[in-house]
Amino acid sequence: MEAKRKFTSNPPAINMTMVGFGQAGTRMVDKFAELRRHEDNTQVYNCLALNSNDGDLKELKYIPKNNQVSLALGGLGKNPERAIRVLETNEEAKDKLKRFITDRVRPVDDLVLFFAGLGGGTGTSTIIKAINEFNEHYNKPIIQEEFKKLQQTEAFQNLQANKDNMAPIEYKKNFKRFTLKAIKNAEEHPKHVKLGIVVTLPVRADGPDVLRQVNEFTQQIWKITKDPMKGVAFTIFADNQHFYDEFAQLEEKDRVGLKVDNFRDYANRQIRDVIHELNTATTGGGTSVTFDKEDFRRAILEHKGCLSINKLSKHIREVANEKDLEDLFMESFKGSAFHQPLDLVNKDEEGNMSAAKVYHAGLLSVLAKDKSFGSGFMDSTKAAVVEELPIKGTVFSGYLVGNNDFQVSAYSFFKTDALPTRLSKGLVNEYQEFMEKQRKISFKQDSIQSIAAGLDDDSDDLDLDLGEFGFDEEEVKPNKEGKGAYLDIDDVDLELLNDDED
Ligand SMILES: Nc1nc2c(ncn2[C@@H]2O[C@H](COP(=O)(O)OP(=O)(O)OP(=O)(O)O)[C@@H](O)[C@H]2O)c(=O)[nH]1
Ligand SMILES: [Mg+2]
């Protein structure tokens, strides 16, 4: 009978290509590769794996052999900084990585997800290189093309003609608008592919050197995430320490039920399940679904930042009425399934409070068909969420009634420029505890505190001072093909464009 089918066998709302780097990355993707389509038993997601040697790929059970690539390096020894140096100097490995991205990762899907465990040599170094290769190869040429088109418009030519009569700040604001418009137009281009990043943070026990290195790499990833040129729709900073702590609390029967016997397997299982559940919950159709596939696509693909997802479930016995459902949702918004809560409100050194930006948010409830509720809870929950969170985008909400093992589940997610607490200050604290230093730590909104001195992330600085854009010293010059007088997107310093105008 149709009703017996779980919603997770619905087709996905967003078709995704999943690419794993290093052991953790490939093992996470292997869990996704396990999923089969209800109709024809083919894999739901297009899954690929990259590791440093053949032996490391052997353990994978579901990713097709054809989709597995080894860089034929001996192993990069849990040292990302060294791994980056090895990759940069080994032409053959560099070329293999590039070809993996340009020839193997054929992005026919709407979203390409890159996975890695930060702290390992292979995963950490290759994911960063791969993000850049991916963007250079797929999206940047489209942005360049759109940028060129805009330069042919009268509006742009007027701006250039009037440049000397304008206050520099005015000129820059306008120029910035054109650049962002080019990026936006490119995003609507049928060939543009959004990238999502899923990385895990190491456990405390991995020690100070790993934490220090990971801290540096998370800063790089965060910067890439916020850079509008890179086409990154979101980054999920999944935290192995969070999974470790949760796993320790699991009862034996839950471990058996989930078929996991260590925190890594538990992490992979959770990440796979929650992402897949959300991706299938809105495509069932029928009147009970008011949160449709297009809404879900918008909520996930529009804007950029850190994506926080939560899922809380209760047995239907414990949910008496709509108020209980609303409470379950509000609790769900306070936490995350993959990491500690986010630092949504910050206090600076002077004690001033500021709130992080929250873009689109989603609320989705899966109700067991065995117990019915009125639908009013959805509206009251939405109102309460808008009240509580500094939302700039849209709150999408809906519910479906289905086969849910006598559970009521509240899924919540949102994209924000805030980070999980452990990342925005925790890794530094842990590191410093390890080093027994008594340095005073100051927290800066949206930035990951640097461990090494002098590496403060200023990418959220939106000050439009003279000289901060690389272009205004540049005169309009022939583009690379020499075909005409166009500004090249490469000549524009986009670091300062990553603000809230999108
Ligand atoms: N969540 C999760 N984490 C894992 C898994 N396997 C390893 N890790 C963690 O991920 C981090 C990186 O480890 P690996 O993925 O083994 O390293 P690698 O990328 O293969 O790099 P090498 O150092 O070259 O082996 C470490 O903190 C591991 O504890 C996994 O299956 N799931
Ligand atoms: Mg490895």
Image (cartoon, rainbow, N blue to C red):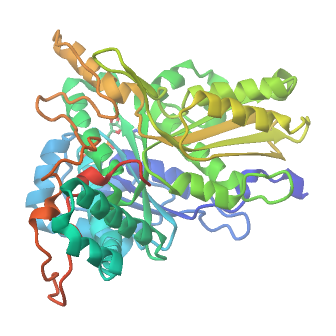
Q: Quadrant of residue 315?
A: top right
Using the image, determine if residue 227 lies above or below residue 436.
Answer: below
Whether residue 149 can be seen here: yes
- Please state if 259 lies on the left or on the right of 213 as rendered: right
Q: Residue furthest front?
A: 165
Locate the N terminus by quadrant: bottom right
Using the image, determine if residue 463 lies above or below residue 502.
Answer: above
Q: Position of residue 376 (x, y in %)?
A: 85, 36
- Please state if 193 lies on the left or on the right of 50 as rendered: right
- Please state if 254 lies on the left or on the right of 112 as rendered: right
**Rendering quadrant holding ligand 1:** top left
Q: Nearer the viewer, residue 303 or 81?
A: 303
- Residue in the picture at 83% in, 45% down: 403
Q: Quadrant of residue 78?
A: top left
Q: Residue furthest bottom?
A: 483
Using the image, determine if residue 184 lies above or below residue 234.
Answer: below
- Residue in the picture at 67% in, 67% down: 41
Q: Nearer the viewer, residue 308 or 465?
A: 465
Q: Position of residue 374 (x, y in %)?
A: 90, 36
Q: Nearer the viewer, residue 122 or 171?
A: 171
Using the image, determine if residue 136 lies above or below residue 207.
Answer: below
Q: Position of residue 394 (x, y in %)?
A: 61, 47
Q: Position of residue 477 (x, y in %)?
A: 12, 79
Q: Quadrant of residue 134?
A: bottom left
Number of marks drawn? 0
Locate the C terminus by quadrant: bottom left
Whether residue 53 can be seen here: no
